[in-house]
Image (cartoon, helix red, strand yellow):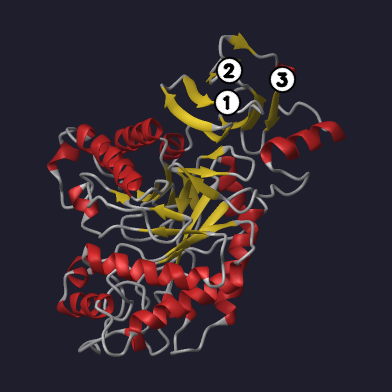
């Protein structure tokens, strides 16, 4: 329940939650320390959210008569508000180079304005945005999305259009593999350098924006470890010339999606403020029998534990940038619950794939009707929108949800301010062994977020 509307309470919530009376403002910049996200006051920030492909930003249309590859949903204020109501404090926003720089050195101001509109909507609802420079099968011209036509080396022998019914074949085509090889070896035309300049333009536009968490350099790269380290370092340094504050996320090779592990680093990432951002799709693709016969749990837990160990080797926080499962796959809901259990046990931040999807199996948290409407998938939403600690005083040590009780262990600093997402009826809250009175628990009912003071080292939220 909402516990009052006095000036004192509004001010208290603003302090405890980073909220203004009408807009949920952000602490910025978010920093990193000892493998965790940190707010400026030293508290730990845990991010849980979703990916959303947005029309115009996820570029799959053509202006030469070819059919669109697929239909991408729009995004408006109601999407941001609904995300916040589900406890999400992160949106990973896929952006395509082809929409931003369709012609060499000609950047689209309309694209930047459209990105800014999504960022602003999310900022008004307390959601950080990770600007993800995204690709799938390198480019819409030969695959699904990513690079503009002028940036494909060698030049394609055949341009492809929609509808997208053969993505698997496109991903493994010679055109796609040749494009990846040329890009990551930075061929004579230096397309990689143009890419770095393009990402700089994002940094110039969004530096100082408190709703932006940072930039993710490249989605699901196909390259060697050495090629990726060189590339990621180059782009990160290009960002840092204009934006010294926002975080920079980098991924391992896309083979991790299938191997559930990637190489360890023997040194920290060479540019400060970095975030390790692998994907987890254990047993989801290729008709993997472990999902169908319900034997995937150990491998899924190990994948997320491996991801934490990999992040530690880079001295970086762990943000699982994508994880998900098709809603019609066997054991899908159990897969999600097991994935979140493993994320809790490793204190991983993560973003579910995906918010809304009309085609490609209609993954996501909604179904799309023939009348154009979007309908909730309540069980999927319940599985994803589960209790967790958004902000923890000091260093978070443990977090576990058993279906009834959320337990959070931490190393207190003495300030003792925490923010917890807990949907459903008003919970019973304990600080150590002491049950807190209702007057000691501040509630924001729009986001089911509760703020409490506790310096005992353990915080417990339970369903009544």
**182 with respect to 8 (left or right):** left
User: Residue extending furthest right?
Assistant: 7
**Tag 2 and tag 1, C-beta contact below 8 Å:** yes
Is residue 127 shown left or right of residue 51?
Answer: right
Between residue 24 and residue 60, name the one nearer to us: 24
Q: Mark 1 = which residue?
A: 412
Quarter of the image where one finds residue 329: top left
Report whether residue 77 is seen: no
Give the mark, 1 or 3, whose residue is nearer the N terminus. 1
| Image spot of residue 459 (x, y percent) | 55, 21
Q: Residue at x 21, y 69 (%)?
A: 171
Quadrant location of the C terminus in the rendered image: top right
Mark 2 closeness class: few <14, some 14–19, many ≥20 residues within 10 Å: some
Considering every residue shown, the one lying at the far left of the view is 289
Relative height, residue 332 to residue 156 (above, below): above
Disc 2 on helix, strand or loop?
loop
Tag 2 residue = 456
Q: Position of residue 26 (x, y in %)?
A: 65, 49
The local secondary structure at tag 1 comes to loop
- 71 or 58, nearer to the observer: 58
Q: CA distance from mark 1 to mark 3?
A: 18 Å
Residue 440 marker: 3
């Amino acid at each position: 329940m909402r516990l009052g509307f006095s000036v004192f309470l509004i001010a208290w919530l603003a302090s405890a939650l980073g909220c203004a009376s009408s807009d949920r403002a952000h602490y910025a910049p978010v920093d990193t320390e000892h493998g965790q996200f940190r707010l400026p006051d030293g508290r730990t920030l845990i991010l849980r959210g979703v990916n959303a492909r947005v029309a115009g930003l996820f570029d799959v249309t053509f202006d030469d008569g070819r059919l669109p590859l697929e239909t991408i949903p729009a995004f408006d204020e109601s999407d941001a508000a609904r995300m916040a109501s589900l406890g999400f404090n992160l949106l990973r926003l896929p952006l395509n180079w082809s929409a931003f720089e369709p012609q060499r050195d000609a950047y689209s101001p309309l694209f930047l304005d459209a990105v800014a509109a999504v960022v602003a909507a999310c900022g008004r609802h307390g959601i950080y945005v990770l600007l993800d420079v995204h690709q799938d099968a390198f480019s819409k011209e030969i695959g699904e999305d990513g690079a503009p036509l002028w940036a494909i080396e060698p030049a394609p022998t055949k341009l492809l259009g929609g509808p997208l019914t053969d993505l698997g074949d496109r991903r493994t085509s010679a055109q796609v593999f040749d494009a990846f090889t040329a890009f990551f070896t930075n061929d004579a035309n230096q397309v990689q350098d143009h890419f770095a300049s393009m990402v700089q333009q994002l940094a110039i536009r969004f530096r100082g924006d408190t709703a932006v968490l940072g930039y993710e350099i490249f989605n699901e790269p196909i390259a060697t470890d050495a090629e990726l380290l060189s590339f990621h370092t180059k782009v990160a340094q290009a960002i840092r010339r204009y934006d010294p504050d926002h975080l920079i996320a980098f991924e391992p090779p896309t083979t991790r999606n299938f191997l559930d592990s990637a190489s360890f680093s023997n040194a920290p990432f060479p540019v400060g403020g970095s975030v390790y951002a692998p994907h987890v799709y254990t047993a989801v693709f290729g008709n993997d029998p472990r999902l169908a016969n319900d034997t995937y749990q150990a491998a899924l837990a190990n994948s997320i534990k491996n991801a934490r160990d990999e992040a530690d080797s880079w001295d970086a926080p762990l943000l699982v940038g994508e994880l998900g499962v098709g809603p019609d796959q066997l054991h899908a809901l159990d897969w999600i619950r097991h994935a979140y259990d493993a994320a809790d046990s490793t204190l991983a931040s993560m973003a579910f794939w995906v918010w809304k999807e009309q085609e490609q199996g209609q993954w996501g948290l909604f179904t799309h009707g023939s009348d154009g409407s979007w309908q909730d998938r309540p069980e999927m939403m319940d599985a994803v929108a589960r209790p967790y600690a958004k902000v923890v005083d000091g260093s978070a040590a443990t977090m576990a949800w058993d279906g009834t009780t959320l337990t959070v262990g931490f190393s207190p600093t003495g300030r003792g301010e925490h923010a917890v997402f807990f949907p459903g009826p008003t919970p019973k809250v304990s600080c150590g062994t002491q049950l807190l009175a209702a007057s000691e628990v501040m509630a924001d009912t729009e986001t089911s977020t509760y703020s409490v003071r506790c310096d005992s080292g353990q915080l417990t939220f339970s369903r009544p």
